[in-house]
Amino acid sequence: MTNKSQNLIKILPFNFIVFGGDGDLAYRKIYPALFHRFADKQLKMEFNICCITRTSNNESNIMASIKTFIEASIDYEIEKNVLEEFFKKIKVIVITKPTIEEYRTLQEFIDNTSERQNVYYLSTPSSAFGVISSMLKKAKILNKNSKVVLEKPLGFSLKSSKEIQTQITKSFSESQIYRIDHYLGKETVQNLMVLRFANHLFEHSWSSEDIDSVQITVAESLGVEKRGNYYDKSGALLDMVQNHLLQLLCLIAMEPPTKLEAESVRNEKLKVLNSLRMFNDKSVLTQTARGQYSRGKINDASVPSYLEDIDNYESNTETFVAIKAFIDNWRWKGTPFYMRTGKRMAKRYSEIIINFKSVRHNVFDANEEIPGNKLIMRLQPEERIELVQMTKLPGPGGYRYRPISLKLDYVDSFEERFPEAYERLIIDVLRGQQTLFMHQKELEAAWKWIESITNSWKKTGMKNILYHAGSWGPGDQIMNEKHKWSKSNKNDIETI
Ligand code: BG6
């Protein structure tokens, strides 16, 4: 069963203009995403890609890097010549300064007279968004077919995110703005919607009546790599929770939208964000934990501490955060949503666990509590869904039971290649579908809640707890005994 109407939206011919076109994100994600959609014959229409760089005399190196990254991303057979055909569509343009003259060089590339859509992908620090969008306007190269894609972080506070919005909306209207959060393009995240809204079984018990708690974990074994400058200003809370984890929380907690279209979905997510209980100086101490990695071992190799990684021994930036959040609405009253994320953790994995309540009474042994069912959605590294249920151990000797997991492994169940999140989201931009992109109101509501944490951290002077690289961080202290993270990490559930 497919939703055919989505597939029917035609993609108009397009120009794809990437600011920050020689940056890490563009090389690793944007060009490969466009290439794979092209190789899959989804982009049969005319199109061009323009990589904007600020460095002159470097065009051939940039083209070489684009090729290297695309080639490295190919893990299936491709038709002969498809790479060459794709590379012919890419042009590197140098804009060293924000002047009208320099921006006008784009005019050659952008044919405003045709029905082509022009997508401006701003893969730059958000401090550049205002200048770029105003220069595009001043150089008179925007039209009704223009769209702008904004990469996170969208500011570093509610105030700065509002300022960005004021600047951007001088050149683009809200319907032309696509605020990207690549977590919403992940297959399992989208499957969460199908699981919830296409299965009566789950939707029926999707509330605090039946759900004891929800855990959202995004653990990374990598450190801050070469992004220390940026990361030290944001930390785990702003880098991951403000966007990715909150968006996951919204999809789990929102009411069913009337239709799977932008306005309905965004409205429901916004209601969730507005119902998040704000933190204060008291609750922040017992319901959040923050940590920073010290030296340790990942896969048996020694790795430096965060302070060594960024070469700044004063930094109090958190590389780990755990939060016990509550949503004050009818559906979720009293159900804690535990979120945690960190760098340099024991391994890379992301998952959502829905912990169902235990049965009311244990008929096998009234003195013992039977652990509740769990619905586990694993986002990465492998994508799968598990339903953990109690099962009788075979054989005589009374009723002995154990948690056993029914497992749906995506890779084993479907033969198709799994498109990367960016592939899906870029196609949505080209089709003009904003459902998986955040509205400014969502962003502001998220910032308000995040600031209730950062302000309380500041006021209480809450310090980081050091954790060894390669461990699970300090999050357990805010969890209830039943659902300590260290327990769920043990993987002690058998699967069938
Ligand atoms: C980015 C963060 O948004 O997401 C990075 O800035 C993080 O710090 C990355 O590593 C994680 O994405 P993924 O898809 O690898 O889980």
Image (cartoon, rainbow, N blue to C red):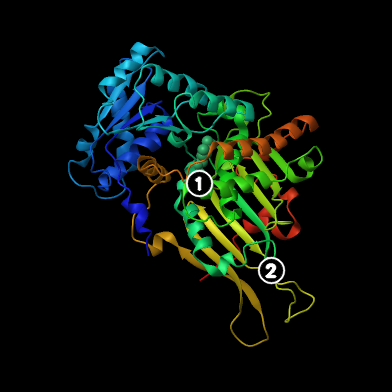
- Whether pointer 2 and pointer 1 mark residues with C-beta atoms closer than 8 Å, the reply is no
Tell me if I can see residue 144 in this picture.
yes
Residue in the foreground of this view, choosing between 457 and 97? 97
- The residue positioned 72% from the left and 56% from the top of the image is 333
Q: Residues within 10 Å of mark 1 (few under 14, many from 20)?
A: some
Q: Is residue 115 above or below residue 186?
A: above
Asked whether mark 1 lies closer than 8 Å to ligand 1, one says no
**Taking 111 as reference, is 459 left or right?**
right
What is the spatial separation of the Cα atoms under label 2 and label 1, in whole angstroms? Answer: 39 Å
Q: Earlier in the sequence, mark 2 or mark 1?
A: 1
| Amino acid type indicated by mark 1 | Glu
Residue in the foreground of this view, choosing between 118 and 267? 267
Between tags 2 and 1, which lies in front? 1
> Where is mark 2, residue-wise?
371
- The residue positioned 34% from the left and 22% from the top of the image is 141
Q: Residue 468: x percent and y percent?
A: 65, 40
Q: Quadrant of residue 243?
A: top right
Residue in the foreground of this view, choosing between 117 and 344? 117
Q: Residues within 10 Å of mark 2 (few under 14, many from 20)?
A: some
- The residue positioned 54% from the left and 25% from the top of the image is 166
| Numbered badge on residue 275 | none
Name the element at disc 1.
helix
Q: Residue 91: x percent and y percent?
A: 27, 26
Q: Is residue 454 above or below residue 79?
A: above
Q: Is residue 373 above or below residue 392?
A: above
Q: Quadrant of residue 467?
A: top right
| Amino acid type indicated by mark 2 | Pro
Q: Residue 250: x percent and y percent?
A: 59, 49
**Taking 482 as reference, is 123 left or right?**
left
| Numbered badge on residue 263 | 1
